[in-house]
Image: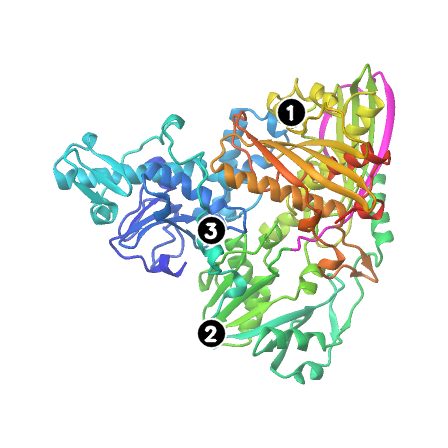
Amino acid sequence: MSRLGTITRRSFLVGAAAITGGVAFGVWKVRQPIPNPLDPGQGAAMNAYLVIDQDGITVVSGRADMGQGAQSSLAMLVAEELDVDWQEVRVAHGPASAAYYNAAMGESLFPVPDYAMSDWMRSLGGAVGEVGKLLGTQITGGSTSIRDGYEKMRHAGASAREALKLAASARLDVPVARLRTEAGAVVAPDGTRLAYAELAEAAARIEPPQVDPRPRAEWRLIGTEVPRADMPAKVTGTQAYGIDTRLPGMKFATIRMTPRLGGTMRSVDTAPALAVPGVERVIDLGTGVAVIARNTWAAFQGAEALAPDWSEAPYPADQAAIMATIEAAFDDSPNSTMRDDGDEDQPGTEISAEYRLPYLAHAPMEPQNATALWDGDRLTLWSPNQSPLLQERRVAEALGIEREAVTVNTTAMGGGFGRRGEYDFSVLAARVAREMPGTPVQVTWSREEDMTHDFFRPAVIARMRGKVDGGRATLLDGQIAGQGVMGQLLPRYFGFSAMGPDRALVEGLFDQPYAIPRYRIRGYTADLPLPIGPWRSVGSSHNGFVMESFIDELAHEAGRDPLDFRLDLARPESPVAAGVLEAVRAMSDWDAPRAPGTALGVAMVWSFGTPVAQVIELVQEDAGIRIARAWIACDAGIAIDPQNLRAQMEGGLIYGLSAAVHGQITFADGMVEQRNFPDTDGLRMPGAPRIETRILQDNPHIGGVGEPGTPPAAPALANALFALTGTRARELPLDRTFRFIL
């Protein structure tokens, strides 16, 4: 980002302000409520997405990249309108600025299923999202990057193109209508070519006209498979993640925090750490310590040598007591009744089932880290994060300084999954740096510290009741108890409490496209102080398992084929949802006889605007059960980059299967029991299925892709296990009950 802070006066910048005709050029003076973030003399700006200067073309992304390819896809939208060769486009993360607020998050506030949301509701959701300017929702999450940027980025590219043509028209004395653009240049009828860089200074003085983006029929880049913008750096090993930050004179540190979350440190003898070669200092942080050393390994060894006296946990000390507290929530009134359709008096045979799912850690490959430099007046931070403005705000509060005195540089991330939307790792690095004026310090968490000090996916208990009559579901009544993610997240992020239902507690249950006469979902919030937060696909990650497992149970009770049963429920509600089910039916050859010892399971979950259906094939072998194949069909509307979309669906499936088979966080004596990957492992390559993915584009609205591949994975696997063994899986992880070949 440092280059963006020193852009020359000859540079040319276009922001989303171009949507309303406002464009910033030259010295970046814009007639907008928010100043331009790329002005070296200003600290915030209005949606600056594109820089053209003598060094070339840089698309500025307000969304972070943690492997999901969002920055590359956003850059494609600009490049499509700008007529530049893809290989000439660079991408940079924008600075912390309200200019990059995420308006798409407004849609998630409505208590209406996405598939049933009308156009005016979506427009209203976007308007509500405008509040993000005030809240500082520069957040990468909720599978919203493309949904938020689809119009903004295309308008930015289109407006820039027309401004450059106007500049060329004035220079060549040729009517603008006779000019065209290609390969980063404006071309005259006689073949004269003016590179965009040549026109930047003149274009900087022109306010471009409003212009609509090109129609789909004229696209040449969107919808094609191109190398991701970050691929060369990743292939050559030059991609700089947060943990790769290096500054002159830098020290290295780690932390050792109370293992009883929310507790304190009573005392600690620092001598054992200081005796480790390379360790220079131990800083008391109140709830733990930071060990400063000449290298990270020495810091790790020093922290491990300590034996602090920790206080007790402010929550039940063991797993059984925690789950009992969650179960007790059913005794209170529900606080999240998001769907209550139809009458209770429905015909049919009634069944019921209870499901239990554990806490889960995010466990990104790159552990939490941040690098900070305090110069006595200002704090500069290099942080792999999903929320730059939140980092800025919370760091300033922790140090007691103005927000303008904090500079946040957002680096690439080795995975995030929601964990890096938090700010604890940045605040701790800032607090350590404050004790070392003039010396940059990198604070890297050990894997054990990272896994045991997460904002976990909440554990839940679900009680489902349903009826079937004449081969169809007539009643579905679901109750879910657990901690409310929004109840913790909103105060932590924005400083105000959640109002009304906690949507995250019931999403994946209340919002599924199934036509059931009596359809009621109630959520019960458990009173526990354990730290929780968004985990890839949030509530749909656990509720998708509950809903699709129970739908499967209803299908078998009705004596129906599970896929046919779902299709009959989905067709009246959503042809788009029915489409992905029909696709996986064909892909998996669902109706064909299977060999002995082979079975299929199916699940379909609509989340983040995208329906995803998955079929899992299992094979029983002497050594155990092998997850052999997986078929995925999804419909996120327009596929900006089909290759990247496919990768996200496959990655989401593997993430979901890993959690289903192995994933859990449990507590004993108030402490997390799982400390590293061997304790809560991911699916390894030998145990991963062969995957086939089909992308449909019938959805009239753009959906997310980073998270929707995860929710169907666990129920598809569980339903396949029932088809193979006759045993229902109602509790995760599955390796407690079944033996897999992994």
Q: Position of residue 78 (x, y in %)?
A: 38, 40
Q: Type of residue at label 2?
A: Gly
List the residue tagged with mark 3. Answer: 231
| The label number, if any, that marks residue 148 in the structure image | none
Q: Few, some or many C-alpha atoms within 10 Å of disc 1 (few <14, some 14-19, many ≥20)?
A: few
Q: Are marks 1 and 2 in contact (CB under 8 Å)?
A: no
Q: Type of residue at label 3?
A: Met
Q: Nearer the viewer, residue 250 or 229?
A: 229
* Rendered-image quadrant of the N terminus: bottom left
Q: Is residue 601 above or below residue 249?
A: above
**Marks 3 and 1, how far apart in space?**
33 Å
Q: Position of residue 661 (x, y in %)?
A: 76, 46
List the residue tagged with mark 2. Answer: 376
**Marks 3 and 2, how far apart in space?**
39 Å
Q: Few, some or many C-alpha atoms within 10 Å of disc 2 (few <14, some 14-19, many ≥20)?
A: few
Q: Is residue 408 above or below residue 691?
A: below
| The label number, if any, that marks residue 586 in the structure image | 1
Please state the extent of the stretch shown in magenta in the rendering. 337-363
Viewer-side label of 1, 2? 1
Q: Secondary structure at mark 2?
A: loop
Q: Viewed as shown, does residue 425 lie left or right of 338?
A: left
Q: Position of residue 112 (x, y in %)?
A: 63, 29
**Numbered marks: total:** 3
